[in-house]
Amino acid sequence: MIGEDRQRLVESPVAREDWPRFLDSFSEQHHGWLINIRQLRPGQSAHPDAAPPVSSPQVSPPLWPHDLPLHAIRLHRNGDRASIVVTAGADTAEAALTLEAVSALCARTRDGAHQGLRIDSTDGSSALIEFRVSATPDMLDGLAESEL
């Protein structure tokens, strides 16, 4: 059905050599957007329709408080190992989260609207950076409140 196809979550892998440029652009484009981060254990689906009930022991609690404005997502390399640092929050209460041993990076969209990112680690776990509200960036009409 057409309606179902338009609602499918699409995950687009980002080539490893493109990670620095992609993350810089993504951070700039989504600076100030409200995000949540949650962790998926190995084998747990990143697709929202496949998620177990909230009471399930497979559901991880958020990795930090909900709805923080995104500041930046940056790549750090140490030889062959890559880590990604996510910073978000108000100027007076910024939070930083380091995701170690990154093995893959995927952009997530639904019907052309950005949903966030999936960051996979070599241990089989993943972190989902999810926007509180998804939108195509061209639908926004200016600066986020945090940018004023």
Image: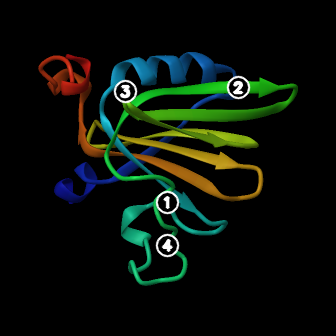
The amino acid type found where label 2 is placed reads His
User: Extreme front residue here?
Assistant: 92
Q: Is residue 66 left or right of residue 103?
A: left
Q: Earlier in the sequence, mark 2 or mark 1?
A: 1
Q: Quadrant of residue 142?
A: top left
Quarter of the picture holding the C terminus: top left
Q: Which residue lies at the image location 53% right of the left edge and 21% below the top edge?
A: 22
Looking at the rendered image, the disc whose residue lies closer to the viewer, 3 or 4, is 3
Q: Position of residue 30 (x, y in %)?
A: 35, 26
* Residue beneath disc 1: 46
Find the distance from the CA under tag 4 to the CA under tag 1.
11 Å
- Residue count near mark 1 (Cα–Cα under 10 Å), binned few <14, some 14–19, many ≥20: some
The amino acid type found where label 3 is placed reads Asp
Q: Nearer the viewer, residue 2 or 42?
A: 42
The amino acid type found where label 1 is placed reads Ala
Helix, strand or loop under label 3: loop
Find the distance from the CA under tag 3 to the CA under tag 2.
23 Å
Find the distance from the CA under tag 2 to the CA under tag 4.
28 Å
Q: Earlier in the sequence, mark 3 or mark 2?
A: 2
Find the distance from the CA under tag 3 to the CA under tag 4.
30 Å
Q: Which residue lies at the image location 25% right of the left edge and 19% below the top edge?
A: 147
Q: Earlier in the sequence, mark 2 or mark 4?
A: 4
Q: Are marks 4 and 1 in contact (CB under 8 Å)?
A: no
The amino acid type found where label 4 is placed reads Val
State the mark number for residue 91. Answer: 3
Q: Is residue 81 above or below residue 59?
A: above
Q: Is residue 130 left or right of residue 118?
A: left
Looking at the rendered image, the disc whose residue lies closer to the viewer, 4 or 1, is 4
